[in-house]
Image (cartoon, rainbow, N blue to C red):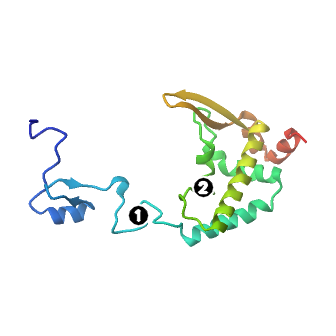
Amino acid sequence: MMPASSSWRCRVASTRPQVEAEQLNTTVNRVGCTVRPMFNRSKDKPGDGDTGGAPAADLWQQIEATLTEVRALSLVQRATWLLSNISTNVQASDQRAQMSSLLAKWVPDFGMDYTPDQWDEWHDLQLLLQEAFQVLVLTRLLVRREGADRFGTVVGYTLSADGAAALGAGNAAEVITRRLPD
């Protein structure tokens, strides 16, 4: 038998387990162990730490507005718009950002609780932004950087020197147009 101070044993609840549980957003099971929900989620408060089902209506309005805005732009304009919006996240040469994390601001992942129309809009927006992102890589304004870890290859992107110069000069659209193949 393990000693009582072993780390595998649960902490014995205080003499007021219910008060402590309410204060710490925890529950006390029948053996007196304090159990905290992972990721600060609570069944009593839907929406804390998770989406609680379908995304909020105002978030879908934001996605629809972004889709309308992005659809109205040409490919070069989309790439320029995207570069100006993600440039602060990819400026440091010693840092890499994954494409999915850079685009998550406009295409957040909510699981599978979409209506068919929302599903189509979400995928349309994701495709348009991914296409603009690939234009930035193709025109060498973003650099694809690969590294290996124990799970495999990790791909990230960093702003190139040309990308920084184009942003600084305010002529990113001209650089993209000049470098983009026909």
Residue at the farthest right position? 182
Where 114 sits versus 109, above or below? below
**Image point (58%, 65%), residue name:** 114
- Which of the 4 quarters of the picture holds residue 58? bottom right
Image position, residue 19 (x, y; %):
17, 66
Considering the numbered disc 1 on the image, is that residue within a helix, a strand or a loop? loop
Considering the numbered disc 2 on the image, is that residue within a helix, a strand or a loop? loop
Counting the numbered discs, the total is 2
Amino acid carrying mark 2 in the image: Lys
Q: Mark 2 points at which residue?
A: 105
**Image point (44%, 60%), residue name:** 50
Q: Can residue 90 be seen in this view?
A: yes
**Image point (76%, 49%), residue name:** 79
Q: Mark 1 points at which residue?
A: 48
| Other residues around mark 1 within 10 Å, as few (<14) / some (14–19) / many (≥20) | few
The first of marks 2 and 1 along the sequence is 1
Where 141 sits versus 53, above or below? above
